[in-house]
Amino acid sequence: MELSQRLGQMSGTEPIQLIERNESLEPIELGTDAQLSYDELPGPAVEPLPMPEEESEPESSTVYRSEVSHVAPTTQQRKGDYYLMPVLGFSLSSYIAYDFNQGGTTFSDDLDGGWGNSIGIMFGKRWDNWTAFCRIGYQYQTYDNDRFASIVPGTFADLEASNESYLLNVGTGYSIPLSTKLSTYGNVGIGFAYRKDSVDGNLYRVVRGSRFDLGPVSDFESSLVFTYDFSMGLEYLFSQNYSARLGYRLLGLTSNESFEGSFQHLIELGVGANF
């Protein structure tokens, strides 16, 4: 400090002053106007620092709870989109009305239905539990009447008849699953059939309890007729790709010339493939 005072006296400058620690913390007053003018000059704009964003708590998502505890798979999910099923069955008909003229004598009566059989094949498409199908089939049905009446008292005919039909129809249906393997179904269909009816027999007359033959009789008629049917039954899925069906089908055919319309009752069994 003494050396600083001497140098200050020699040079005419202010000697170094000792600054106490407490005084160094006080603001230094500006000594000149030039410094004041400099400090008042506008400086670059200082943008304030961005305030830290508070992290928002995540919104709690709404959870909907289903009241359904179990959803049963549809027939399409169980068995596939398509199926191909051959069908065999036997048929029974109640009666069929028939009339003909022989030698100027008119015969008109009913032919009693007997047993018959059927065969066919079905191809179908499934949508959920709904189905649409196409069927090609053949039916054979027998009839008979050993006392076919005529308008002449005491004159009869002993007749045996048969009905054949080649069928093509389309339809739709609905299936209801009863378990993982068993389901029930109901179908309706419409279409066309080539129907053939034939009759063979003998004419005879009864006089005082005795029979006298009058000669043979034969008839054959065919035409294209309209068909309609209704079916229902059970279907069992015994493997992933194969199922069996047992059901009842009511088949109706419109009239064929002298043969009136008929109904056939069919019991059918089918085994088919699903894909």
Image (spheres, rainbow, N blue to C red):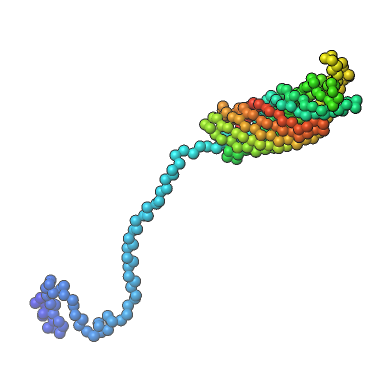
| Residue found at x 68% / y 28% | 265
Res. 57 in view:
yes
Residue 41 is left or right of residue 239, and the answer is left
Q: Position of residue 211 (x, y in %)?
A: 84, 15
Q: Nearer the viewer, residue 193 or 61?
A: 193
Residue 69 is left or right of residue 229, and the answer is left
Q: Is residue 79 above or below residue 33?
A: above
Q: Which of 41 and 218 is in front in this view?
A: 218
- Quarter-of-image position of residue 120: top right
- Quarter-of-image position of residue 122: top right
Q: Where is residue 275 in the image (x, y as percent from the top left)?
A: 61, 34
Residue placed farthest to the right in the image? 103
| Residue found at x 60% / y 39% | 130
Q: Which of 141 and 69 is in front in this view?
A: 141
| Residue found at x 74% / y 27% | 95
Q: Quadrant of the N terminus?
A: bottom left
Residue placed farthest to the front in the image? 208
Q: Where is residue 200 in the image (x, y as percent from the top left)?
A: 83, 22
Res. 169 in view:
no
- Quarter-of-image position of residue 269: top right
Q: Position of residue 134 (x, y in %)?
A: 69, 36
Residue 153 is left or right of residue 113, and the answer is right
Q: In this view, does 230 lie above or below 6?
A: above
Residue placed farthest to the left in the image? 2
Q: Nearer the viewer, residue 250 or 175?
A: 250
